[in-house]
Image (spheres, grey):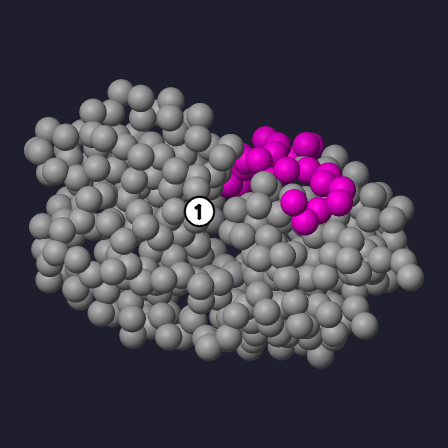
Amino acid sequence: MRKIKIFVCCTEQSGENICANILSRIDLNKIQADGVCGKQSEKYITNKIYDLSEFKSIGFFEIILSISKYLKMIRSLKNYINKNNYDLVLTIDSPDFNYNLVNQLRKSKFKNKIIHIVAPTVWAWRSYRAKKFANIYDEIFLLFNFEKKYFNFKNLNKTFIGHPIFYIKKRNIKKNYKYIAFLPGSRQNEVLKLMKYFTHIEEYIYKNNLNFKIFIPTLPHLVSLISEQTKEWKTETFISTDIDQFDGYYDDVYLSITCSGTASLEIAKRNIPQIIIYKLNYFTEILFKPFVRVKYANIINIISDQMIIPEVVNSNLNKRKLLENFLNLFNSKENQDVQINSINIYIKEIVKEFSPYEESVNRINKLLT
């Protein structure tokens, strides 16, 4: 019997985490997986076409500057998928890149099943994308139950799988902690834009003898960049890519300054007080501000419709405001407790009683049999 063939496409770290956990649970004796992924997933992949480190753009203008490269990638992937006639195509997150890839596949008469995992945030902006996805995808796996109503189309199956922070453990409560965590993002552009703000907090920690070390969890392809950016720091700093050791480090984290995204939800689930930061290109922010339908960046703040987790983002992000928010959290046990207690009320709407990866694999296996 020939192996069933699936093609996966994930171009950013949050998708890579999902990809690796799904592929680790499928029967690779019966199923061959090829595609676009990162270091976590590649051990399950037979033919790797691109690495996610090749996808570095985050804002509208950055993407425009790289558009010819991405169009070339899409053409190449479309031809590769058609040539090998995959039984299933699985796209994960990265809605703009993956939509255009799948749209080209459908135009080239690709008829087999295509699933997308992690819905585009149509509830936040560009709501028209829901119908566009429904026109080309067979099924969508949703992380949030409330998203179902936005993808209510007869020709699109919807499976609520829950959020991957299901697996994240709460840190142990202690009297004394060792670290302040800095999470600068999973893309090179994010790191370069945010590092000067982390440096400002590092300088404050050192000059004011706060008696904390710094912990920076990151990805292998960013280690050299972060090491270069932090080489002048005087505060003892640990940069780690060892995911298996992260729980131990996080148990000793007092608070975190976190790049907005999946990482901020993971920190929330760990019950670590945090401040969220982010920096879009100024013109990207101005261009899209009228179209954004939510007031906040973090999903917990969005669901609760209040600023539970402080956000200092985009044009509001400067060194003074970040330090002010840092000190408000650092010096106030009450502010920390209010944040964590509020998070634990709303996180129940995100984390369910079943594994999102097991749910995904069960559904994929049904579609392939």
Q: Is residue 255 above or below residue 211?
A: below
Looking at the picture, which amino acid does disc 1 mark?
Ile
Q: What residue lies at 73% left-to-right and 39% top-to-bottom?
A: 49
Q: Nearer the viewer, residue 194 or 174?
A: 174
Question: Whole-percent x and y of residue 55?
Answer: 59, 37
Q: Nearer the viewer, residue 328 or 369?
A: 369
Q: Secondary structure at mark 1?
A: helix
Q: Nearer the viewer, residue 359 or 1?
A: 1
Question: Whole-percent x and y of residue 248?
Answer: 32, 50
Outermost residue, right side: 1
Q: What residue lies at 36% left-to-right and 62% top-to-bottom?
A: 169
Instruction: Kindly tell me whether residue 321 is visible in this rendering.
Output: no
Left-right relation of 234 to 359: left
Question: Whole-percent x and y of residue 150?
Answer: 56, 72
Stretch of the chain drawn in magenta: 43-69
Left-right relation of 267 to 280: left
Q: Is residue 308 above or below residue 250?
A: below
Q: For residue 210, what is the image quadrant? A: top left
Q: What residue lies at 84% left-to-right and 43% top-to-bottom?
A: 79
